[in-house]
Image: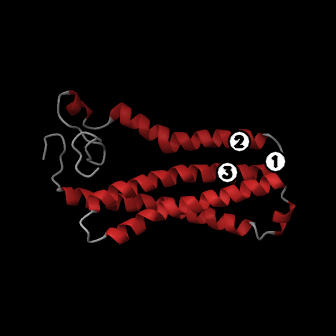
Amino acid sequence: MTPSTGRRETQEERADRQWSELLQELRVAQTGVQILFGFLLAVVFQSRFEDLGDIDRNIYVVTVMLGSATAAALIGPVSYHRLLTGRRMKPETVIWASRMTVLGLVLLFCTMCSALLLILRVALHNQLALWLVGAMALWFLACWFVFPVWALTRGRPGRRAEEHGGEGEDSNGDAPPGRGSDAR
């Protein structure tokens, strides 16, 4: 244990903890994706779907494809873990599952924006839909990516230890990338 870490865990223990945390995050994201994807699948069977113009139908198809890709990326870590269980690859599994989760969040961002565009175009029938989707896209980006990155640069715990030559940690007790982290 280094003075700044406050944790005593082996590489395997760290990987187990990180996997558990990742599963909790995935549960939240997967629930939202399942609800959105279910809605998207049902839309095509509604009588009003026939009234959509070509542009709106194309937006719908793109949205369904993005939703499918999102579901695959956010369910992928479960499959990855299941296929690698027992092969002493937990740290690698955590790394790849984390990357797939970030990809899933990016795809979810695209899916949400596309779904909003379709809904608002049908509801408003004017250019205001594009402005509203643009504003919401900025809000998603801020909540999902900008705020976390800003927090990393502003007040990461252990930052003072880094400035004094020690290795700091993030709020999960993980060493920063490239600073001796054994699980990344």
Q: CA distance from mark 2 to mark 1?
A: 11 Å
- Numbered label attached to residue 132: 2
Above or below for 63 versus 150: below
Q: Which residue is mark 3?
A: 114
Q: Amino acid at mark 3?
A: Ser
Check contact, mark 3 vs mark 2: CB within 8 A: no
Q: Amino acid at mark 1?
A: Leu
Q: Amino acid at mark 2?
A: Leu
Check contact, mark 1 vs mark 3: CB within 8 A: no
Residue at the spot 57% in from the left edge and 49% down from the top edge: 109
Residue 5 can be seen in this image: yes
Image spot of residue 130 (x, y percent) = 73, 41
Q: CA distance from mark 1 to mark 3?
A: 15 Å
Answer with left or right where residue 127 lies relative to residue 139.
Answer: right
The residue carrying pointer 3 sits among few (fewer than 14), some (14 to 19) or many (20 or more) residues within 10 Å by Cα, namely many
Image spot of residue 99 (x, y percent) = 41, 52
Image spot of residue 64 (x, y percent) = 66, 61
* In this view, the mark in front (3 or 2): 3
Check contact, mark 2 vs mark 1: CB within 8 A: yes
**Could you tell which of marks 3 and 2 lies nearer the N-terminus?**
3
| Count of numbered circles in the view | 3
Answer with left or right where residue 41 lies relative to residue 159.
Answer: right
Residue at the spot 26% in from the left edge and 69% down from the top edge: 87
- Numbered label attached to residue 32: none
- Numbered label attached to residue 124: 1
- Under tag 2, what secondary structure? helix
